[in-house]
Image: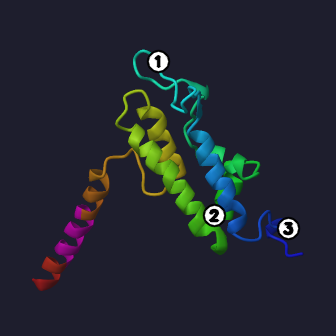
Amino acid sequence: MPKGKGGRPPKYKCKEEIEGLIETYFDECQGIPWFDEEGHPLQTDKGFIIYNKAPKPPTVTGLALALGFNSRMSLLNYQGKKEFMDTITRAKSYIEEYAERRLFDKDGVQGAKFSLINNFKGWSDKPKEDSDKEIFEKLDVILEGINHAAK
């Protein structure tokens, strides 16, 4: 049997083994509403759906646990395997999109920000102008060198 790093056999052999588990995880995140006799979701007087099992936000750790991993890092390590990269990246993109939407919700902003910065590449809480400033400083040094050489 092929073994992964550390001598352990890989948890999954192909992406198809995890695709159904990923879909089930995201379905469970939607929650399970109560239905009336006609099959319509029950609602409160204010129009909110009444749930038998409440919806939950999709998270990277929740996805890892749904796939049978012991930690978020185990899932991230599996994402590094060529045959699983696209499948896990797409699943994580769904989670990222959810967190990104929460940035516009005053109650979810801080949690969404934390998740995006710590779970997804390209997110930072540092203003972009800091990196622009560094670029301009480097350009100034280069231009000074060119001007000095031209004299």
Q: Earlier in the sequence, mark 3 or mark 2?
A: 3
74 to the left or right of 137: right
Q: Secondary structure at mark 2?
A: helix
98 or 144: nearer the viewer: 98
18 or 65: nearer the viewer: 18
Q: Residue at x 62, y 53 (%)?
A: 23
The residue to which callout 3 is attached is: 9
Mark 1: amino acid: Thr
Q: Secondary structure at mark 3?
A: loop
The residue to which callout 1 is attached is: 44
How far across and down, in percent of the image, does residue 54 sit? Answer: 59, 29
Q: Earlier in the sequence, mark 3 or mark 1?
A: 3
Q: From where the camera sits, is residue 77 visible?
A: no
Q: Is 144 above or below relative to 109?
A: below
Q: How far apart in space, not on screen, are marks 3 and 2 (Cα)?
A: 16 Å
The numbered mark at residue 79 is 2
Q: How many marks?
A: 3
Q: Quadrant of residue 92?
A: bottom right
Q: Quadrant of residue 52?
A: top right
Q: Secondary structure at mark 1?
A: loop
Contact check, label 1 and label 2, Cβ < 8 Å? no
Mark 3: amino acid: Pro
Q: Residue at x 65, y 68 (%)?
A: 84
The numbered mark at residue 24 is none
Residue furthest top in the image: 45
Viewer-nearest of discs 3 and 1:
1
Contact check, label 3 and label 2, Cβ < 8 Å? no
Q: Is 26 above or below relative to 54?
A: below
Q: How far apart in space, not on screen, are marks 1 and 2 (Cα)?
A: 42 Å
The residues colored magenta run: 136-145
